[in-house]
Image (cartoon, helix red, strand yellow):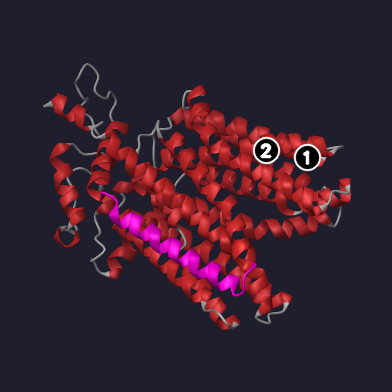
Amino acid sequence: MNNQKCSTLFQKPRRRTSIIQCIYVVGFMDLFGVSMIIPLLSHHVKALGASPTVAGIVGSTYGILQLFSSTIVGSWSDVVGRRYSLLTCLLLSALGYVLLGMSTSIALFVLSRIPVGLFKHSLSICRALLSDLVSESERPLVMGHFNAASSVGFILGPVVGGYLTEHEGGFYTSAFTCAAIFLTNAGLVWMLPWSETLIHRNDTNSSNDTSKVCHDNNCNKSVQNGSHAKSHSSVSAAETDPGSRAPGKHGGGLRWREVSLLQPAWKQLSSVGSKIHMVASSDMWDLFLVRLLMAIAIMLYYSNFSLAMEERFSLKPKVTGYLISYSSTLGALAGFLVGPVTQLYGNNMPALLLHSTVLTCSLIFLYAAAPSVWQVLLTSTFFAISTTIGRTCITDLELQRGGVQASGTLIGAGQSVTAVGRVLAPLLSGLAQEFSPCGPPSLGVVLALAAVGLLLIRIPKWNGRGMKKTVKLGNSE
């Protein structure tokens, strides 16, 4: 019997690999479609007759909605499951882009941004789904590949969008194309073998929380957050037929799937509120603060990059564009380095986060003090790599400390924190530019140093109580 349990932990690797690769495709197409539209939005809203002030207010609508909806939608995916939440986000985002393709007035333009701002969280849910499918040791590698695939889509999208815009009605064609991409993604998600994802979800929990997995062909019997073969069938059946699932306790402890999509809205909201409250009251403020400080520091690095290159080195916008494209391409490719680097560190994510943060801080300082374009090129090369690794590290640490049962809530909360940075960074950048073109990156160095100091203080406490100690969000209800 023990041998049978051990074998189920690693069953059907080809099927699981196919599921993960399909999610990579969804991530690529998602940002490919979005990046077709983003460069065209400001031109379109001005073409509709909006003044610069109105255009700025309209443009901020999306960011504000994302700020408040990221955590809620992520937590909702923990409550009702990844399948229904991901399908809902993709379909409603497609609706938003259809409305955008029909926008012939500012009012309709604003209306089209509402469903996208509220439900464009498909990438976050994909990351949560990947964390369900893989073990803790595999997670950085898989997340790095997913981020790389998404980034490649973000690089290629503007090329296609720019080509379509050259034709008559190009913006509307781009918007409808983006909507079609999201509908295609919804079809891919619908066709995923979700029964297999549930099996791997349960097996991953079992393997993550077992002291010894399959040692000498025997599985350790102490499982904290997973369930064995007896509960696999019941959970799979409940997910396949939501109406058949009772709202009581599961024997295996996977409490995050207790509430069906068919349950009353108040019950879903109650579960969502409970999970968000547990994150807010948890001892994870240090990770979220590091995320915020580094997000602002990185955004300050890029905030006036083109203007600074022109004023400091008389660089033409065309050359600056090449430099930005070079850095973006490296950032995408750096996603493939996350797995090997993590293995080099022996999966010691706190140490890797600290070192990547120190490197990022040093590179921002070198950029601010760069005497030549070649030094800027050198810093941009390593900056793209360090920031990619750092983002993956901090997401992985949030999932380690918060528990995979609430991965949607945790990833959503992280996105909300980053959204706060997007609101604050332009304001801080404008104030810093009053003093010098190097003001924004100089301020970024200060914030990155604060993040390094916080990590130096807090990492010993993480190690002291063990990274395996979590908030236990899955048992909060």
Determine whether, in the image, residue 42 is placed left or right of residue 18.
Answer: right
Q: Is residue 449 magenta?
A: no
Residue shown at the point (76%, 46%) measured from the top left: 441
Vertical order, 455 against 31 (above or below): above
Tell me residue 463's x, y (percent).
Answer: 48, 28
Q: Is residue 172 magenta?
A: yes
Judged from this view, the residue extending furthest toward the top is 216
Tell me residue 198's x, y (percent).
Answer: 25, 46
**Quadrant occupied by the N terminus:** top left
**Which quarter of the picture shows residue 184?**
bottom left
Q: Which residue is mark 2?
A: 383
Vertical order, 183 against 365 (above or below): below
Residue shown at the point (34%, 59%) measured from the top left: 187
Determine whether, in the image, residue 248 is placed left or right of residue 36.
Answer: left
**Which quarter of the picture shows residue 229?**
top left
Q: Is residue 281 visible?
A: no
Tell me residue 188's x, y (percent).
Answer: 34, 55
Determine whether, in the image, residue 98 is placed left or right of residue 433.
Answer: left
Looking at the image, tell me whether mark 2 or mark 1 is earlier in sequence order.
Answer: 1
| Dot 2 and dot 1 residues touching (CB under 8 Å) | yes
Judged from this view, the residue extending furthest toward the left is 1
Disc ID at residue 367: 1
Vertical order, 346 against 193 (above or below): above
Disc ID at residue 227: none
Indicate the secondary structure of the residue bearing disc 1: helix
* Image: magenta residue range: 166-193
**Which quarter of the picture shows residue 358?**
top right
Determine whether, in the image, residue 84 is placed left or right of residue 176.
Answer: left
> Looking at the magenta stretch, what is its main secondary structure?
helix
